[in-house]
Image (spheres, grey):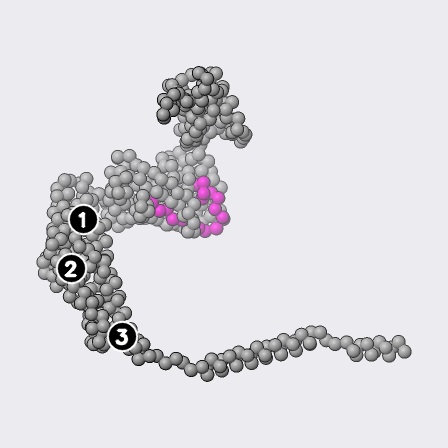
Amino acid sequence: MLSVIATSTATAQFDLEKVRKKAKEVLSKDSDDEEKEEAAETSAEPQRKLTPWEEEQASHEKGRKVLTEADFAVRPLANIRSVYSGMLTDKREAQNFYDKCKVADYPNRRLQVEQAVQEDPELRDLEEHNYNELMTGFPKHFAQLTDEYLIKEINNAIETAYAEKAKGAARAGAAREAAEAALLTAEGVLLVTPENTRVQQLRADAQAAAESMGAAFASNVYSGTFHQEHVGKIVFSSSPIEAGQENAAAITSTFAAGDRIYGMMYFDGTYKEVTGGSSVAHTRLLVDGNEMVSYVFKLDAEGSARSWLKSEIVPDPAQSTTRGAQLFTEKLMSLSPRRHTVIIRTTDDYNKTIAEGEFSLDCTSGLDKIAEVHRGLSEKKLAGVGLPSPAMRNAGLEKQMKAALKDWSPKKPIKVIITDRDWTIQHHPVTGAVVSRTINTTTVFKLPDGSCRYFEISFKQQYAGGKYGKAQQFGVGDSADILCSKVK
């Protein structure tokens, strides 16, 4: 009897997975049917017929687009009403004008408009204002602009170029810039009105000036043929590179982590010229496209007069003379053990690149050697750091200042050097009453790792009740590591 019951129970069981599968098929079929019904309803829905006015507008759409694009292209030139004297002697302004002329592409735009009107004669009346401006108004405006201003500017720039050249080698860059500005302006005008014979002659004069100034510039500014061939670039070698004495065979773009790496930047002008007169530039190190180092530097008068600049990436620490090497090696020694693409880029204050170079660095081994170079550079830097002589000695005040720095823990102040001869008194802006006094110091701290670092710290004493209170930290300035052995 028990066996019969067991058999009946087994027969009554069902397969849940089969039920789920069947339900899924039914749902899928229903969904497909609904989509077909919606598609049928959509296809059956009649398309709205365009009105006669809409059909007419659509028929003119292509031609209107041509006129609109042409109007948009020439508008920047049409908006120029005057040019102040000497404006286009500036190469950047001349380049801007040339770019506008190139975008305008007026002769071709005019042909396109004529063709559009030929295909759709009604377009001329429908777009009468735009058509007349493009075909009549703009040519008249540009001809007047050329006669009254642009021809004068081209002549002015050419004269400026020769005048600058006569001043000697120091003005070779300015002479070339003015000549190239004249050429850009003339070529810009001819892009718009290629048949202008007066400007054709001026273009020839500007071309001759540009070639003359370029040759003078090359001989006076570039360090040699190698420099001229690598303007705007940074080249690399495993040994120091000397401008004008380059060994082309030693220039490479492939290094291993254990190699020495030196660079040379070649500028298109003196450093002062390519930095816009500021002599300030920014150098960046990028590894595989990611910026890892960025620092700003300024050259003195001697360095600013050169058209090249040495760069050190992984140098011999004993011979190193640049700040960048320590920053570069600090990041390079921590790279992953594989091949990397490294870019060195130097820009002016406006982020315009004045020199750039790239090399491959195989870091599968040798990273410890870069770390060794970094240590050597750091030690050399520390050896050159010293402390100022005290301008005032006051043991009691120095002790008070150390006590005021208790919040700097775990850094411990070990020496305070007062660098001002006397206090600076602060007065109330209205009453003139004394409110406080401040004084500057160089304060050395012992760090938790046993090294030393100094900070420029100012202290203040508040004035109340006819006397000054205890010294309190007022401000913090620059800081630098220093050898503890130099702290006496």
- Residue occupied by mark 1: 87
- Residue 461: percent from left, percent from top: 44, 22
Span colored in magenta: 329-346
Q: Relative to 297, does residue 179 appear above or below in the rendering? A: below
Q: Nearer the viewer, mark 2 or mark 3?
A: 3
Return the mark for residue 142: 2
**Residue occupying the far front of the picture:** 431
Secondary element type, mark 3: loop
Q: Amino acid at mark 1?
A: Met
Q: Decide if residue 382 is on the left or right side of residue 136.
A: right
Q: Amino acid at mark 2?
A: Phe
Secondary element type, mark 2: helix
Q: CA distance from mark 1 to mark 3?
A: 42 Å
Return the mark for residue 60: 3
Q: Relative to 39, does residue 332 appear above or below in the rendering? A: above
Q: Relative to 396, does residue 88 appear above or below in the rendering? A: below
Q: Residue at x 22, y 63 (%)?
A: 105
Q: Relative to 344, does residue 97 appear above or below in the rendering? A: below
- Residue 387: percent from left, percent from top: 41, 24
